[in-house]
Amino acid sequence: MRSYAAVAELPLVVESCELELRERETASGFLRRTTVIRLRGRGEEGLGEDVVYQADEHTVGVEAGPPSEVVGSFTLDSFSQTLGELDLFPGPPAMPVSRSYRRWGYESAALDLALRQAGRSLAEALGREPRTVFFVNSMGLGDQSSLEPILQRSRHDRILCFKLDARSDWDEELVTALAKTRRVAVVDLKGRYVGTVVDQPADPALYRLVADLLPEAWIEDPGSSPETDEILAPHAERITWDEPIHTLDDVLAFDQVPLMVNVKPCRSGSVQALFDLYDGCAERGITTYGGGSFELGPGRGHLQALASLFSPFAPNDVAPGGYNEPELSADLPRSPLEPRLDRTGFRWVDA
């Protein structure tokens, strides 16, 4: 049975919906807001998290409240179809992809609630065995890139691996030092973002350093120019994608189908699109790894649960939230994480 078919007909009764705003200042000065979505029915509660990046869109959304149409009796599939017909934003979002982010918040809460009302866990429903989850610490190397953030985290965990945001101030000395650590699993070139705070134009010098000096690392989201395309051509099997990936069709649209892709559930928007993406990649021998969006609530646990079921041994960007802090707490769990899926629902139970 395909993954979505295993959950699509789960009965779902929603008696109320509550939105809860969360916010946190980040080390880079970015105010992160998310919205926790609580669906309640038949004595159970399902949790989801809207990870839209524009802080004001959370404030406006919470003030507007949830749409009345999410209350009622459904199957998981009919609830999803209802969401697909709604505009979940009071006004047009700043980024079109935000519609998928918000929809995923509701869909993940509905999946959690439907499973709890059925008395089943996601692993049981899918017939999958949860496994230990390997994760990487996703991060940049400071305002002026240096090896120090790597060294600081190495004092916490001597085998911790990294997914690093590359910048044009990387030089040969720094990249050589990174290579010597043998802990760089993925280099995110951020080449597909336009008009965001993380834009990183295609830089031939940077791409050559990464390609030549970090031969063990996956190369994520390169930008395109005649010169950078030529540099990366011999390394095509190492290229992986994040920002362009929403559905299986996006994976298959590349001239060369990648060997691995970053799957962020919020980009898929619906449970069906996400599960079809997982299944389609597995059927074609394409590996997946989990991606995060600086979740502040239950969304991070959802990512860990999905990684445990679909991509346990990959460089998953699903580290516990404490890894976003400038200084790591001594009691932070280390990779790999033992599987901690709740006995019912779609949640990861923190130690």
Image: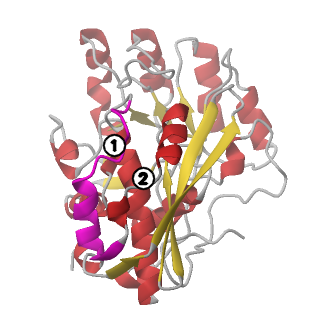
Q: Nearer the viewer, residue 226 or 95?
A: 95
Q: Residues within 10 Å of mark 1 (few under 14, many from 20)?
A: many
Rendered image quadrant of residue 349: bottom right
Decide if residue 263 is in sight here: no
The residue shown at (56%, 45%) is: 34
Q: Can residue 88 be found in the magenta stretch? A: yes
The tag earlier along the polypeptide, 2 or 1, is 1
The residue shown at (40%, 71%) is: 111
Give the percent coordinates (x, y) of residue 136.
Answer: 58, 48
Give the percent coordinates (x, y) of residue 246.
Answer: 28, 45
Q: Is residue 281 above or below residue 258?
A: below
Q: Residues within 10 Å of mark 2 (few under 14, many from 20)?
A: many
* Magenta segment boundaries in residue numbering: 72-93
Q: Is residue 166 shown left or right of residue 181?
A: left
Decide if residue 256 is in sight here: yes
Q: Is residue 275 above or below residue 40?
A: above
Q: Which residue is mark 1?
A: 99
Q: Can residue 325 be found in the magenta stretch? A: no
Q: Which residue is mark 2?
A: 289
- The quarter in which the N terminus is drawn is bottom left
Q: Amino acid at mark 2?
A: Tyr
Q: Is residue 81 shown left or right of residue 344?
A: left
Q: Amino acid at mark 1?
A: Arg
Q: Are marks 2 and 1 in contact (CB under 8 Å)?
A: no
Q: Is residue 117 shown left or right of residue 171?
A: left
